[in-house]
Image: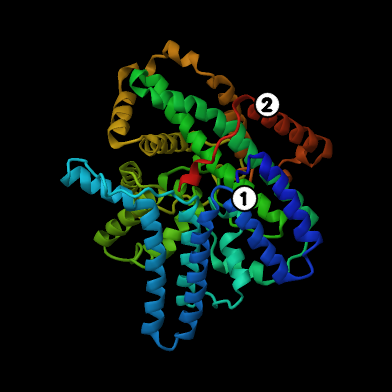
């Protein structure tokens, strides 16, 4: 079920009313209802995929109990933990990566002929997200960071909670699970705050991302016929498309969770205002970045080891991050590209140079900050070209075309694209997020004094809703990009 769908507009208020006004007196019954609602939400695409998420939940819950039982016998606890990791990664590998590995093998050794070897598999929506969330639980139990829970209903609700089920944030059991183990009380102010965050998320997804997608698809589908200037437009618009799409989903998910008294972690912190690549990765898809940091990078030794191991560890987490995004060499290349950009900073100990908010306490950035943000954004845009391309060849041709001298010439084709409205929407989003860059999301009203006036707030709400309706009626609805991951 899509957030930006008519079905969800009916589903959400029904679930909300039953959750708070019918089932709120019994915690286990309320959690059981969360599971039912989440399975309906997820099974709306294909009910057969519910078997996988139920199996993943059961494996991780059981492994947690066994790990805790065998804590005095370390080798047994370790065996259970490794077994659970292998089983879950095997499921993920078969459904997401089997055909990729087989086809890659066939391309090298069988002249590309993989007939009879490929499987007709459906990629389960969000399998990478809920698999990593389940794995983090059993690993945290093994590391004594959290006690295993015997409450199977609360645990299944933790894994399947519908707002963040299919595209994150990838929550940790230490944050989310206790919220299902304790009684929740309705808070009007938090619920209103959640509605605002949802509204801002819908603006970024539908008004910004979906409009940018029209231009991006036209340019990338015919990139060989475009001039360098048009290709640059396509690359920049894709940067805002993927940001509006994914951060918009996160805002909707976090806002929806607030309606049910659940607090999810922030997943984006205005990443395009970063002053270097290290800061960008602290602000982009935070839940995944910190997952790889805590469960892969640090266990490998992190940055407290020899230079060679630092290099190794950096490339491992970035290549894994790229491969996590999809079964294509372009994603691996994208991860490797960012590893090359990140490596000098970590080797020189400058990877945590910028941990504060840019231009903190000031309305405008300095010229130095403008140059830093522009250069970082340009490097990120080049990476997005690799990410968006269908194969390495297309990525290479696209980037080479960007380097042509005609990039400074504005082609007449530029004016054939309806990107002028999209540019306005992008500017509005950037201005709002710049003014709110130190806050959780763009419409957090406490950040701007004029928003404290009720009339002003409702005017803003009205404009966003009308714009949303006009865009949907014009271009329709579309899936979220990260559903494929």
Place of residue 451 in the rendered image (x, y in percent of width and height, measured from the top left):
76, 39
Q: Give the labeled residue for mark 1.
A: 253
Of helix, strand and loop, which one carries label 1? helix
User: How many other residues sit within 10 Å of disc 1, few (<14), some (14-19) or many (≥20)?
Assistant: many
Q: Is residue 377 left or right of residue 2?
A: left
| Count of residue discs | 2
Of residues 305 and 119, the one drawn nearer to the viewer in this rendering: 119
- Residue named by callout 2: 470
Instruction: Identify the residue at image location x=59%, y=73%.
Output: 152
Instruction: Work out whether 294 lies above or below 431.
Output: below
Q: How far apart are the two marked residues, 2 and 1, measured between alpha carbons?
A: 23 Å
- In the image as oriented, which residue stretches furthest toward the bottom? 72
Residue 205 image position (x, y, % from top left): 59, 37
Task: Look at the numbered disc 2 and give the secondary structure of its residue.
Answer: helix
Q: How is the image coloured?
A: rainbow
At 66% from the left and 27% from the top, the residue drawn is 473
* Apparent side of residue 186 relative to residue 241 in the rendered image (left or right): right
């Amino acid at each position: 079920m899509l957030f930006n769908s008519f079905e969800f507009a009916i589903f959400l208020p029904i679930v909300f009313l039953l959750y708070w006004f019918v089932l709120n007196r019994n915690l286990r019954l309320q959690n059981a209802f969360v599971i039912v609602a989440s399975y309906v939400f997820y099974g709306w695409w294909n009910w057969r995929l519910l078997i996988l998420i139920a199996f993943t939940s059961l494996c991780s819950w059981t492994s947690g109990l066994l790990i805790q039982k065998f804590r005095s016998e370390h080798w047994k606890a370790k065996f259970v933990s490794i077994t659970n990791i292998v089983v879950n990664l095997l499921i993920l590998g078969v459904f997401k990566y089997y055909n990729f590995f087989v086809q890659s093998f066939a391309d090298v050794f069988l002249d590309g002929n993989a007939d009879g070897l490929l499987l007709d598999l459906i990629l389960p929506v969000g399998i990478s997200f809920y698999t990593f969330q389940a794995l983090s639980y059993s690993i945290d139990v093994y590391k004594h960071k959290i006690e295993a829970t015997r409450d199977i209903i609360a645990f299944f609700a933790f894994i399947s909670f519908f707002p963040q089920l299919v595209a994150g944030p990838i929550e940790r059991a230490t944050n989310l699970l206790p919220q299902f183990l304790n009684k929740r009380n309705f808070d009007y102010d938090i619920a209103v705050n959640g509605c605002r965050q949802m509204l801002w998320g819908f603006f970024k997804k539908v008004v910004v991302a979906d409009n940018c997608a029209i231009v991006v698809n036209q340019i990338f589908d015919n990139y060989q016929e475009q001039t360098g200037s048009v290709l640059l437009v396509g690359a920049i618009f894709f940067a805002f498309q993927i940001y509006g799409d994914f951060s918009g989903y996160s805002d909707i998910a976090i806002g929806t969770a607030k309606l049910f008294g659940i607090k999810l972690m922030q997943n984006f912190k205005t990443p395009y205002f970063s002053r270097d690549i290290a800061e960008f990765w602290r602000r982009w898809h935070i839940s995944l970045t910190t997952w790889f940091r805590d469960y892969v990078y640090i266990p490998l030794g992190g940055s407290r080891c020899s230079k060679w191991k630092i290099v190794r560890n950096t490339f491992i987490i970035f290549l894994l991050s790229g491969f996590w995004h999809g079964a294509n060499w372009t994603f691996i290349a994208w991860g490797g590209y960012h590893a090359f950009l990140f490596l000098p900073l970590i080797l020189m100990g400058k990877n945590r140079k910028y941990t504060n908010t840019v231009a903190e306490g000031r309305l405008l950035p300095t010229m130095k900050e403008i140059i830093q943000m522009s250069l970082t954004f340009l490097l990120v845009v080049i990476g997005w070209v690799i990410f968006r391309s269908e194969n390495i060849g297309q990525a290479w041709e696209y980037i080479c075309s960007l380097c042509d001298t005609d990039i400074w010439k504005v082609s007449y084709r530029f004016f054939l694209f309806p990107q002028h409205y999209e540019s306005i929407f992008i500017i509005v989003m950037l201005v709002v997020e710049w003014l709110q860059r130190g806050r959780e999301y763009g419409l957090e009203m406490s950040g701007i004094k004029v928003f404290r006036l009720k009339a002003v707030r409702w005017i803003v709400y009205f404009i966003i809703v009308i714009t949303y309706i006009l865009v949907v009626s014009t271009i329709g609805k579309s899936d979220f990009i990260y559903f494929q991951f």
